[in-house]
Image: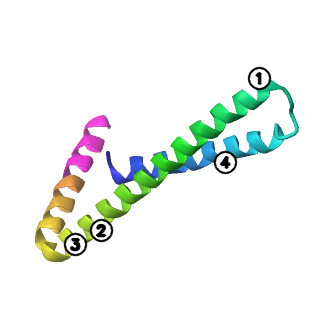
């Protein structure tokens, strides 16, 4: 996955976790066996989402650090790659016109 896709996924997961927490708070006063069971399931899903979110953030940080180290170690290769990518994007845009 690209860094942009990782960032987007992390943002979406933050949003889902926030919404789930708001839902749990809103239903805190609900009583009955069914509501307790539902809240327990939602809480378990929320805990799993938080764990996955932390894993993705750790992976994104590691990928960013590895990229930074590579660019500092091999600056000319990084410049060449960026130039080649720019050329390809320019050609694709030019073909559409």
Mark 4 or 1, which is nearer the eye? Answer: 1
Could you tell me which secondary element the residue under label 1 belongs to?
helix
How many C-alpha atoms fall within 10 Å of the one at disc 1: few (<14), some, or many (≥20)? few
User: Does residue 54 sit above or below 39 in this rendering?
Assistant: below
Image location of residue 6, percent across then percent down: 40, 49
Pick whichever, 25 or 78, lies toward us. 25
Image location of residue 49, percent across then percent down: 53, 43
Image location of residue 25, percent across then percent down: 79, 45
How many C-alpha atoms fall within 10 Å of the one at disc 2: few (<14), some, or many (≥20)? few
**Which residue is rendered at x = 30% and y = 60% of the image?**
63
Lower sequence index among marks 3 and 4:
4
Reading the image, the residue beneath label 3 is 69
Could you tell me which secondary element the residue under label 2 belongs to?
helix
Reading the image, the residue beneath label 4 is 18
Image location of residue 84, percent across then percent down: 16, 56
Mark 1 or 2, which is nearer the eye? Answer: 1
Rounded to the nearest whole Å, what is the CA distance between mark 3 and mark 4? 34 Å
Rounded to the nearest whole Å, what is the CA distance between mark 2 and mark 4? 28 Å
**Which residue is rendered at x = 22% and y = 45% of the image?**
91
CB within 8 Å, label 3 to label 2? yes
- Left or right: residue 15 compared with residue 66: right
CB within 8 Å, label 3 to label 1? no
Lower sequence index among marks 3 and 1:
1
Rounded to the nearest whole Å, what is the CA distance between mark 4 and mark 1? 23 Å
Chain part drawn in magenta? 87-97
């Amino acid at each position: 996955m690209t860094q942009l896709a990782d960032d987007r996924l992390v943002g979406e997961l933050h949003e889902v976790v926030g919404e789930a927490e708001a839902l749990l708070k809103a239903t805190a006063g609900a009583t009955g066996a069914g509501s307790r069971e539902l809240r327990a399931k939602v809480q378990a899903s929320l805990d799993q989402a938080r764990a996955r979110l932390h894993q993705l953030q750790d992976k994104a940080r590691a990928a960013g650090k590895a990229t930074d180290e590579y660019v500092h170690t091999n600056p000319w290769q990084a410049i060449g790659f960026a130039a080649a990518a720019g050329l390809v994007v320019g050609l694709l845009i030019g073909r559409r016109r």
